[in-house]
Amino acid sequence: MNILESLKSAIQSIKGNKIRSFLTMLGIIIGISSVITMSSIGKGGQESITGNLKEGGYGKFNITIDKTDENFRWKYLLNEDIVNKLRESNKFKGVSPKISVNLGVKIEGSARRQMIMFNATTPDYENIDKINILYGRNILPFEYENGEKVIVIDNITAKDLFGNSKSALGKRIELFKGRFGNPQSYKIIGVYQNPLEQMIKVMGGKRVPRFGRMPLPTYEKLYDSQKTGYTTIILESKTPEDMALSMTQAKELLDSITGEAELYDINVENNGAASFDSILTTLNIFVTFVAGISLFVGGIGVMNIMLVSVVERTKEIGIRKAIGAKDIDILLQFLMESIILTGIGGVIGITLGVFLAIIIGYFIGINPVFSFITILISLIVSMGIGIIFGVTPAKKAAKLNPVDALRAE
């Protein structure tokens, strides 16, 4: 009896017991579909949460100054001269100053106030640290040049101030520095996605940091930034892979410009994103592993059904061995039955898992991310389960004594 005949015999046996075959596959179907669904939803959620953070971080780094150092002097503040020389070196894809400051915010005519972190920036900064505009538009180049009193705010702030994010467009709010600062009226021209919103929600936090942006020249008109210098200079390497080299070059340039390179701290922009991404990756692996336990349970179910099948077909095995079937032929037939069952179950499970991931993702607002490697591994694992858990029943069937098998009722 050759392999082809063993295969035909295995298929006929499966067709002859359709309900039992389906119940045998059910554990594998549930296991594989659980792995595919949990893995794709987990990866989709991870991309949704960290996508904006990654886009705004990889290949970018900050320069700040340590004002507590004993060698610090006011002449070493981050200023326009340092920015220009870094930019003129042509060693970086982008260079931009930034002033980060907490400003009080209130609607005109209202007494309610809240604090928001504003970044006073340049057009170059908008290219380096991009934001996702939900409503309206970003600040235009001429508005930067003229120091216009226009701002963009994040969607959480807009919703809190005006009831919903879209309603904030075109409205005016007052900004003031310090408790007794002179309020200045600004027009809201855009609302953008708060980059930390999803991350804070997943971590169980309720208080999401609020952000806004304004033209740097506008801030400099109102407040004397020469005394405090820029908070940060943000740089982008020409390629993310060259970031380490770019950071070294920035350090060398600072040394040549000021002679006090040790006063300046250079930090990677995406530390928070990378750390959170790592946490989510670990969590996703754990959840997928838990879902994969059902595959083991399904494998035990396969073995159990195959053992029952051996008992029920004892006489059939005896007849086949009596007319010349060898132990290896019997072994192959039962192994093939097991592999076919788990293989078909794996294909159905993958299809069901993809379908469930799409449906669940639609309702919870996450685009599932399917991995070809994960799907391939799932199919291989399901076939492997057929081999592993089918060996014992197959061996039992192959070792049956023909005489004893023929006597079986």
Image (cartoon, rainbow, N blue to C red):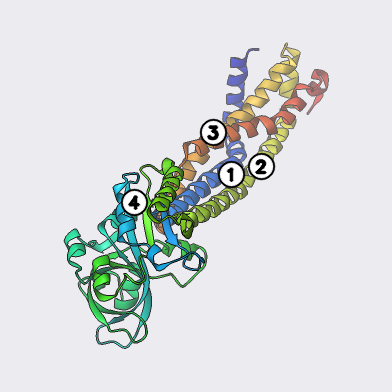
Residue nearest the observer in this picture, 389 or 341: 389
- Residue receiving disc 3: 344
Residue 55: where, in percent of width, then height? 38, 51
Label 3's element? Answer: helix
Task: Select label 3 or label 1 by which is in front.
Answer: 1
Viewer-proximal residue, 251 or 346? 251
**How far is disc 3 from disc 4 in space, using C-alphas?**
62 Å
Q: Is residue 130 among the parts visible in the rendering? A: no
Q: Earlier in the sequence, mark 2 or mark 1?
A: 1
Query: Do labels 2 and 1 touch, CB within 8 Å?
Result: yes
Measure the C-alpha gap from mark 2 to mark 1.
8 Å
Disc 1 designates what residue? 31
Kindly identify which residue carries mark 4.
86
Disc with the residue nearer the chain's start (3 vs 2): 2
Q: Secondary structure at mark 1?
A: helix
Please tell me which of labels 3 and 4 falls first in the chain: 4
Label 2: which residue?
296
Disc with the residue nearer the chain's start (3 vs 1): 1
Residue under the image location 66 percent in, 42 percent down: 296
Label 4 vs 2, first from the N-terminus:
4
Which amino acid, by three-letter code, is at mark 1? Gly
Q: Residue at x 34, y 87 (%)?
A: 180
Dot 4 amino acid type: Leu
For the residues labelled 4 and 2, the Cα–Cα distance comes to: 59 Å
Classify mark 2: helix, strand or loop. Answer: helix
Crowding near pointer 4: few (<14 within 10 Å), some, many (20+)? Answer: many
* Kind of residue indicated by mark 3: Ile
